[in-house]
Each structure stands twice: as C-alpha cells, then as structure tokens.
Image (cartoon, grey):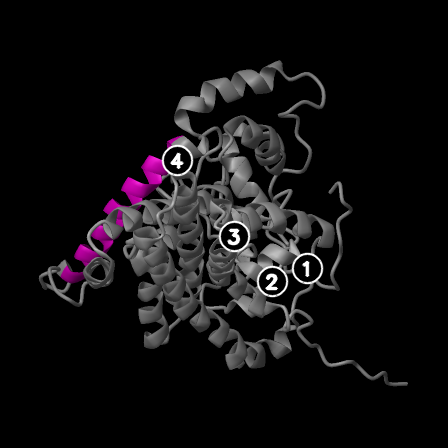
C-alpha cells in the first residue's frame, strides 16, 4: 500500500522578513526620542539585539530541520528570499542618513550620542552579514550590492579577503579570521583587522600581477569598494557638515568590530589537520561552530549554519543545512557575542568545549601560542570533570546533514 507524502514547505518563510527589523529599529528609536526627548531611546537597537533577542532565542529553542535535497533547486530559485537581502540595503542607508541628521542637529547628550553610534554600528555591522550572503553569489549585481552594503563601515576589503582568503585558510594558523584556543577577543581584534587588510591587498594585487596588469585601477575590487566609502562619506559630509565624519568613523569601528567578534566565535580553537602529503585536510563540518537557535538564524540569514556555508559557499541561506558533526555553540550568536567580549566568561564557556571536540587532545586544536603552556598546565592540573576534561570523542569523518524535524532545547540547555 502506498502512502501519500506531504510536500515539504519552509515553515519559517513568514519569519524571514524579521531580518529587516534591525535596520528598522533606529526609526523606532527616533520616534521614541522625538516623542519623549529621552536620550535612552538611542540604546534601543543594541538592547533589542543583545538583550531581547537572546532571551527569545532561549525560549523558542532550536530548529534543526533541513530541506530535502530534491526541493533545494526550487528553494534557491525563489526570488522571495533574495529580495529580502536586497531590501536590507535601502533600510540600512535610510537609517544611516536619519542618524547623521540626529548627530548633527539633535543636540544629544554624550550618553545619547554614544547610543546613536552603537545603533548605527549594529545596523551596519549586521549589514556586513548581508554583504557576506550577497558577495558569495555568481550574479554580478549581487556582488556589487555586497560592496554597497560594506561601504558605511569602510570594510570593502572584506569582499576579497573573505571569499578568497578566509575560505581557503579557515581553521588554520595562517588565517587571520580564525581565532585560536586561549586567544581573547581583544588580542584577536588587532590581529584580524590588520591581518585581513594585508591579506586582501596581497590577494588582489597578486591577481593583477599574475596577468601582467597594474593593480591601481578601478577594476581592483578593494579600490572600487573603498571608493564607494569615500563617495558616501563625502556626500554625507556635504549634506550634514564635516563634523559628521567623526560619527561615521566611530560607527564604522563599531560595525566592523561586530563582524570581527562574529569571526572570533565562528572557528574558535578549531583546526584542520595536516594530511600525509603535508597539506591541510579539506574543510568539513567539524571546522565551524554552529548554532541552530531559531531566532538568530532568522535575523542573520542562517549565518549560524556556518559549516554548510563553508562547504558550499554558493548555497543560498534558505537552503543551508544543520550537520550532526558540527560542534555546537551553547547559544545563538547574539548571546555569544556578549560572552566573547568578556574573556573570563568566554574561557569558562568555550575552552572545555574545544577540548571535548578533540577528545581532550590539546595538540589537535588551533592554539594561541602564548597560551599554550597555560592551557597545558590547566589540563594537567585538572582532576576529574573540570574545565578541560574531555567530554566527547576525538573528531572522526564528517557525517552528513541532520534529518528530521525541529527540536527544542529546554530553558536550561
């Protein structure tokens, strides 16, 4: 007797527009400030992103359902998902213009001005995630939209370094965007900011020199991306006065620092091993920290299904899969970003998870050299189920994507 199968459908399809809430929050903050005159209103955006969203994330839990492969071609071709990423950009730029006007004419107190900087920095920092989604695609228009999304933070070189540098060297000591076990975010920040810039420039200039061409051209993907930033800042300075350049610089630092703290947590301590031929093994699901938290995956276009993204960079966000072999973060990115800013909290939450992922073998991890001796001493000193006791098997061959429906964690999970 045959059985009828129910066609798969994306149950989160009505939820994906929530990703546009972040660039809408500055307008909500402006309305509150305009109605009440309260400067605290400008802290609404960071409060929602790093306060409200983590709580809702915890309450709703995980969704580990994967789309069946037979529906993926149609799912990826659905323009609905694509247009949501496109719409982030006009909302992002509208919020930037609004906040430039408030900076210039609002007469804000210092606490309110700091909140304004944080607000736009969060919007433009999360816009880098939208740029990340667009920049991996083959369509020329989407690649240019990626650079436009990067312009407010002045981080146009990310377009080159992420696609051609990070994806090649991920989870190795050579990658400036892969953080190391025992390395604090505050030590990682200068290493990744400077290292990624240098790497991007080397990659792009090498591309031209291999063809016998001068890299100082408008075809240089770094230079034309940076030119967008220069033009944007010049237009805003003319419209709102030179003093707005201070605001633009401050929010840019907040924005690209938000990107880098996400980079920090995505591959912390994870390492690809050398093969017998001396090369690094192929990237697989074991080399990225993942989270199946439903809410943050909706807000971040499923960036948290990072393993599948590295395995299949062209795969669109709505089709990314959860893998059993991927190490799991204890919470969504919004929560983990806050933990990463507090090194003692981060070490307590994450270091033992890295060691458990490698069966307690420190030598298999990507270790921060200055921290190696301290980590060895702590491991030796641990007696019983302490911070560094192994809690899982050594990494083995990567398994396929998880099948089945969504699961939820308990409130304490």
* Mark 4 / mark 3, whichever is N-terminal: 3
Q: Which residues are magenta?
A: 187-208
Comparing labels 2 and 3, the label whose residue is closer to the camera: 3
Q: Is residue 149 magenta?
A: no
Q: Which residue is mark 2?
A: 321
Q: CA distance from mark 2 to mark 1?
A: 8 Å
Q: Quadrant of residue 233?
A: bottom left
**Frontmost residue, 384 versus 408:** 408
Marks 4 and 2: in contact by CB < 8 Å? no
Q: Are marks 2 and 3 in contact (CB under 8 Å)?
A: no
Which secondary structure type mostly characterizes the magenta part of the structure?
helix
Evaluate if marks 4 and 3 touch, with contact meaning CB atoms under 8 Å apart.
no
- The answer to whether the residues at label 2 and label 1 have Cβ atoms under 8 Å apart is yes
Please indicate, yes or no, whether residue 197 appears anywhere in the rendered image: yes
Residue at figure coordinates x 50%, y 55% from the top left: 29
Q: Earlier in the sequence, mark 1 or mark 4?
A: 4
Which residue is label 4 attached to? 188
Q: Going by the image, does 66 lie left or right of 80?
A: right
Q: Residues within 10 Å of mark 1 (few under 14, many from 20)?
A: some
> What label does residue 402 carry, if any?
1
The residue carrying pointer 4 sits among few (fewer than 14), some (14 to 19) or many (20 or more) residues within 10 Å by Cα, namely: many
Q: CA distance from mark 2 to mark 3?
A: 45 Å
Q: Which of the marked residues, 3 or 1, is nearer the chain's N terminus?
A: 3
| Residue 36 image label | 3
**Dot 3 surroundings within 10 Å: few (below 14), some, or many (20 or more)?**
few
Q: Position of residue 267 (x, y in %)?
A: 49, 44
Q: Is residue 16 above or below residue 369?
A: below
Q: Give the CA separation, mark 4 to mark 3.
A: 41 Å
In this view of the protein, which residue sits in the foreground, 19 or 347? 19
Q: Position of residue 150 (x, y in %)?
A: 33, 59
Q: Describe the element under mark 4 as helix, strand or loop.
A: helix
């Amino acid at each position: 007797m045959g059985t009828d199968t129910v066609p798969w459908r994306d149950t989160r399809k009505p939820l994906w527009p929530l990703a546009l809430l972040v660039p809408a929050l500055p307008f909500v903050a402006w309305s509150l400030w305009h109605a009440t005159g309260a400067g605290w209103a400008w802290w609404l955006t960071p409060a929602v992103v790093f306060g409200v969203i983590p709580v809702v994330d915890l309450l709703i839990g995980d969704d580990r359902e994967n789309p069946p492969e037979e529906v993926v071609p149609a799912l990826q071709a659905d323009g609905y998902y694509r247009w949501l990423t496109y719409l982030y950009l006009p909302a992002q730029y509208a919020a930037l213009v609004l906040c430039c006007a408030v900076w210039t004419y609002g007469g804000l107190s210092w606490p309110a001005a700091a909140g304004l900087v944080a607000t736009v920095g969060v919007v433009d920092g999360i816009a880098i995630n939208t740029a990340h989604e667009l920049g991996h695609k083959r369509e020329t228009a989407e690649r240019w939209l990626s650079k436009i999304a990067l312009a407010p933070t002045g981080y146009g070189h990310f377009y080159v370094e992420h696609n051609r540098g990070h994806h090649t060297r991920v989870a190795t000591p050579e990658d400036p965007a892969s953080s190391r076990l025992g390395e604090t975010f505050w030590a990682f920040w200068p290493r990744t900011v400077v290292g990624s810039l240098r790497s991007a420039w080397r990659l792009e200039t090498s591309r031209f020199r291999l063809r016998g061409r001068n890299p100082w051209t408008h075809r240089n993907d770094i230079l034309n991306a940076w030119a967008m930033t220069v033009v944007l800042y010049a237009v805003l300075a003319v419209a709102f006065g030179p003093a707005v350049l201070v605001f633009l610089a401050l929010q840019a630092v907040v924005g690209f620092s938000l990107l880098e703290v996400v980079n920090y947590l995505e591959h912390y301590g994870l390492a690809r091993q050398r093969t017998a031929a001396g090369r690094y093994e192929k990237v697989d699901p074991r080399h990225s920290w993942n989270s199946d938290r439903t809410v943050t995956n909706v807000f971040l276009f499923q960036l948290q299904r990072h393993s599948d993204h590295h395995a299949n960079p062209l795969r669109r966000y709505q089709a990314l899969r959860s893998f059993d072999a991927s190490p799991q973060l204890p919470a969504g990115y919004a929560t983990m970003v806050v933990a990463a800013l507090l090194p003692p909290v981060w070490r307590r939450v994450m270091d033992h998870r890295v060691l458990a992922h490698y069966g307690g073998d420190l030598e298999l991890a990507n270790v921060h050299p200055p921290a190696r001796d301290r980590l060895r001493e702590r491991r030796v000193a641990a007696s019983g189920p302490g911070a560094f006791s192994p809690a899982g098997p050594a990494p083995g061959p990567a398994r396929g994507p998880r099948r089945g429906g969504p699961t939820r964690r308990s409130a304490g999970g």
